[in-house]
Image: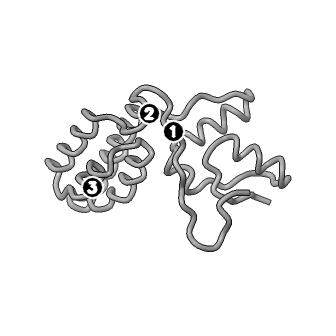
Amino acid sequence: VIGNGDVTNVAEADFMLKSTGCAGVSIGRGALANPWIFRQLVQWEQSGAYGPPGNFDDRLELLLRQFRYLLEMTTERRAISMFRKMGHWYLKSMRVKPALRHEFQLASNLDDFGQAVRQIAAEGPAVGSRSGVLPDMHIPVPGGPVERW
């Protein structure tokens, strides 16, 4: 049996495994807020310890890398359109000010996209520090399932 229930960090995975007896956990939205969760889970499983999730600069670098991969696969216009949803998750987890997230969402070409990213990079997070661990992000759950175990 695989446990499923919005696991967003190692502590929640550990709690689910121990409290339910499931053989593993399914990770979905949790990876949108913390793309490092898979690496952290492997480290935890192998050694009992794990490193922190990425800081602001790590997340910005990953955002740009993922966007470049998307550009290799499709047109500029389509890549920008497709990346808006993923970019939104990145920017929320990076604690970027809502006004800057909005500017990012309005980008319609590479120049706009680049300008928004440069402004985000220059301003850094609205909460937390640029090089430290960012605060946890609440991930809303659609109506129906419970939010916590």
Q: Quadrant of residue 116?
A: top left
Judged left or right of residue 109, residue 58 is: right
87, 72: nearer the viewer: 87
| Of pointers 2 and 1, the one earlier in the residue sequence | 2
Position above or below: 69 against 126: below
Residue for badge 2: 128
Task: Specify the amino acid type for callout 3.
Answer: His
Give me the C-alpha separation between circle 1 and circle 3.
21 Å
Q: Earlier in the sequence, mark 2 or mark 3?
A: 3
Is there CB contact under 8 Å for labels 2 and 1? Answer: yes
Label 2 is placed on what type of residue? Gly
Density class for disc 2 (Cα within 10 Å; few <14, some 14-19, many ≥20) is some
Give percent across and percent down for residue 146: 68, 65
Up/down of 13 relative to 55, above or below: below
- Res. 4 mark: none
Relative vertical location of residue 45 with respect to residue 72 in this rendering, above or below: above
Q: Would you name the residue on which mark 3 appears?
A: 102
Tags 1 and 3 in contact by the CB under 8 Å rule? no
The residue that appears at 73% across and 35% down in the rendered structure is 45
Q: Quadrant of the C terminus?
A: bottom right
Residue 136 in which image quadrant: top right
Label 2 vs label 3: CA separation?
Answer: 20 Å
Q: Quadrant of residue 109?
A: bottom left
Mark 2 vs 3: CB contact within 8 A = no
Local crowd size for mark 3, using a 10 Å CA cut-off: few (<14), some (14–19), many (≥20): few
Instruction: Give the numbered dot on residue 135.
Output: 1
**Residue 58 in the figure: left or right of residue 80:** right
Residue at horizontal 25%, vertical 62%?
78
The one of 108 and 71 positioned closer to us in this rendering: 108
Quadrant where the image shows the N terminus: bottom right
Q: Amino acid at mark 1?
A: Pro
Q: Secondary structure at mark 3?
A: helix
